[in-house]
Image (tube, rainbow, N blue to C red):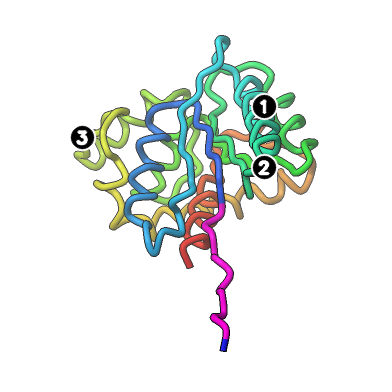
């Protein structure tokens, strides 16, 4: 009897472009913690900062890398961009370009900044903060938690991920009325859907 050859179950190739070092470090810590049976082996987490530091530039780079991957015949199964509102310009254009791409480029967006996702590891809130430094100061004073943008923050917070996911779901529910009435995530006083990316990666390893 001839030998039966089994089809190789290759891990899905995923590209995640981050605008900042904090996001990259967090995601790499998450990937390492989730790493199981090589299913996340082909997840590439890269920090990319265009010359103008704009989210639109990140989306354009994602499109470019998608095209190059297709030409190399090793296409990405999914492409994500991770960026914040901060004081960036052309955020609506970045969303429009990502959504109009074929296939669409997924976005994990935080308003005002990535640290809002970090804050949700501690509490349920829709409070407005003007910038990341105000959030960091708030976390450090209220929770006596030492935070640095270059630390392995995922490792320090991974036991609180269930809290963060629950609080993010609550915040999205609070935002649902405005979003249903055509406001955009960047129009709101507070927003993050970083949990989408968490759930996506968690699903890959299963």
Q: Which residue is mark 2?
A: 73
Q: Which residues are magenta?
A: 2-12
Marks 2 and 3, Cα distance to the nearest angstrom?
45 Å
> What is the secondary structure assignment of the residue under circle 3?
loop
Q: Residue at x 48, y 52 (%)?
A: 198
- x then y, percent, for residue 20: 44, 26
Residue 199 left/right relative to 147: right
Question: Residue extending furthest top?
Answer: 51
SS of the residue under disc 2 = loop
Name the residue tied to disc 1: 64
Where is 106 relative to 134, above or below?
below
Along the polypeptide, which appears first: circle 2 or circle 1?
A: 1
- State if disc 1 and disc 3 touch (CB < 8 Å): no
Tell which of 174 and 93 is nearer to you: 93
How far apart are the alpha carbons under marks 2 and 1? 14 Å
Disc number for residue 146: 3
Q: Is residue 6 magenta?
A: yes
Q: Earlier in the sequence, mark 3 or mark 1?
A: 1
Residue drawn at point x = 62 percent, y = 25 percent: 61
Mark 2 or 3, nearer chain start:
2
Please tell me how crowded label 3 is: few (under 14), some (14-19), or many (20+) other residues with Cα within 10 Å. Answer: few
The residue lying toward the viewer, choosing from 87 and 188, is 87
Residue 94 locus on image (x, y percent): 69, 27
| 170 relative to 178 in the view: left or right | left
Dividing the picture into quadrants, the one containing residue 21 is top left
Which residue is found at the position 76% from the left and 31% from the top?
Answer: 96
Q: Secondary structure at mark 1?
A: helix
- Residue 78 placement, left or right of 101: left
């Amino acid at each position: 009897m001839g030998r039966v050859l089994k089809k190789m179950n290759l891990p899905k190739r995923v590209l995640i472009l981050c605008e900042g070092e904090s996001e990259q470090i967090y995601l790499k810590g998450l990937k390492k913690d989730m790493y199981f049976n090589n299913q996340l082996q082909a997840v590439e987490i890269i920090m990319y900062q265009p010359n103008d530091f704009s989210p639109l530039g990140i989306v354009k780079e994602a499109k470019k890398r998608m095209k190059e991957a297709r030409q190399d015949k090793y296409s990405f199964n999914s492409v994500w961009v991770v960026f914040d509102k901060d004081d960036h310009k052309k955020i609506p254009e970045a969303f429009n370009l990502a959504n109009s791409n074929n296939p669409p480029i997924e976005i994990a967006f935080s308003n005002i900044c990535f640290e809002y996702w970090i804050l949700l590891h501690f509490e349920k809130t829709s409070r407005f903060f003007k910038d990341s430094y105000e959030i960091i100061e708030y976390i450090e004073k209220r929770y006596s938690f030492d935070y640095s943008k270059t630390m392995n923050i995922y490792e320090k917070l991974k036991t609180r991920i269930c809290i963060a996911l629950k609080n993010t779901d609550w915040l999205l529910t609070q935002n649902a009325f405005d979003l249903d009435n055509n406001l955009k995530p960047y129009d709101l006083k507070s927003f993050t859907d970083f949990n989408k990316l968490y759930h996506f990666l968690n699903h890959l390893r299963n």
